[in-house]
Amino acid sequence: MVGAGNPPVDPLVTGIDELDRVLGGGLIPGSTVLLGGEPGIGKSTLLLQVASALSSSAAPALLATAEESVQQIGLRAVRLGSSDVNVLAENEVGTIIEHSVAVRPSVLIVDSIQTVMSSNTAGVPGGINQVRESASRLVRHAKDSGSALILVGHVTKDGAIAGPKQLEHLVDVVLSLEGEPSLGLRVLRSQKNRFGATHQVGLFEMTEQGLVELQKPLLGDWSGEVPGTVAFAGVEGRRSVLVEVQALVSASSGPQPRRSVKGVSVARVHQLLAVLERHAGLSFAGLDVFVNISGGLRITEPAADLPIALALVSSLLDRPLGRVGVVGDVGLNGSVT
């Protein structure tokens, strides 16, 4: 019962504003966060930066890794400019907990939950029994010790976090780091948060120095003087983001015209092409069509219909639109709302 004798616990600020924003102010002592994402997306990099940011605190973070050696972590830390990070290369949950009891960190990071194991449980690391038991023991330790716990989770081909579904119910917060591995933009989303809202997102850019927080529009040096480009003011969570919608229409060299789309639904682009042909008299038959959202951001808002359509027309007619920002939902009857 929360009352005068049991005041709410203040969150632990990580020092990374975009992460703290998604968490709802910071990490709650004794809570568990599950961070998922595709391989190479930057999960380990982000958490190494968290551990480094907390290194000067009274109770520095402890990074337990079962995937890399201390030397490998050290090489990444040098590249990122991180220092004074407590690292433990271990895959046995009991040993990780014993070390955490001795160190008493403010945050215990386990990378990853699919690679650690409990010696008292049958099965191989990553199996359902091992993941369930290892996660349960680590969560109990976090609650008993007061250390915040961050578990890294691998994802399956369909984007779901691998392991038993119980894993997501066991933790307090589920975060997902998304983006195109070949591009720089990373979006941190909250899928579950017992201590805050889930509509906040964090924006980062992957650089040689690690993940850099983004608090500016994603337009870069866009001028609008090139045909096929238009600015779109979208919304990610409760944040507005200004991005560039790019389109390229060219003569097809093959029997079947290409339709290459990144950042929006292919079906959506096909629908807009049909609307433009039916209601604007513009034919894209026999032409290759390419559509892209700058920075690797994925847009699902219906309001992106009009900027996509105008970018397509601009490229088709080879006429730049200039520095124009566009928002609008295009209906099947050609109406714009």
Image: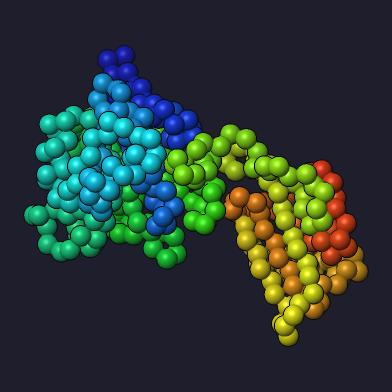
How was this image coloured?
Answer: rainbow
Q: Residue at 72% across / 53% down in the picture?
A: 245
Residue furthest toward the top?
Answer: 4
Compared across the picture, whether 127 is left or right of 38 comes to left
Instruction: Pinpoint residue 337: horizontal percent, then vertical percent.
Output: 80, 50
Compared across the picture, whether 237 is left or right of 59 comes to right
Residue 209 visible, this orientation:
yes
Instruction: Pinpoint residue 28: horizontal percent, then vertical percent.
Output: 34, 30
Residue 139 visible, this orientation:
no
Residue furthest toward the left?
Answer: 120
Q: Relative to residue 5, is residue 52 depicted above or below?
A: below
Quadrant location of residue 139?
top left
Observer-nearest residue: 243 or 128?
243
Instruction: Pinpoint residue 225: horizontal percent, then vertical percent.
Output: 82, 49
Q: Residue at 35% across / 26% down in the picture?
A: 12
Observer-nearest residue: 212 or 147?
212
Q: How many marks?
A: 0
Q: Residue at 42% across / 48% down in the picture?
A: 42
Q: Residue at 27% across / 48% down in the picture?
A: 72
Residue furthest toward the right?
Answer: 281
Query: Where does the N terminus fall, quadrant-wise?
Result: top left
Q: Relative to residue 58, is residue 301 depicted above or below?
A: below
Q: Relative to residue 279, is residue 322 depicted above or below?
A: above
Compared across the picture, whether 187 is left or right of 42 comes to right
Instruction: Pinpoint residue 58: horizontal percent, then vertical percent.
Output: 26, 21
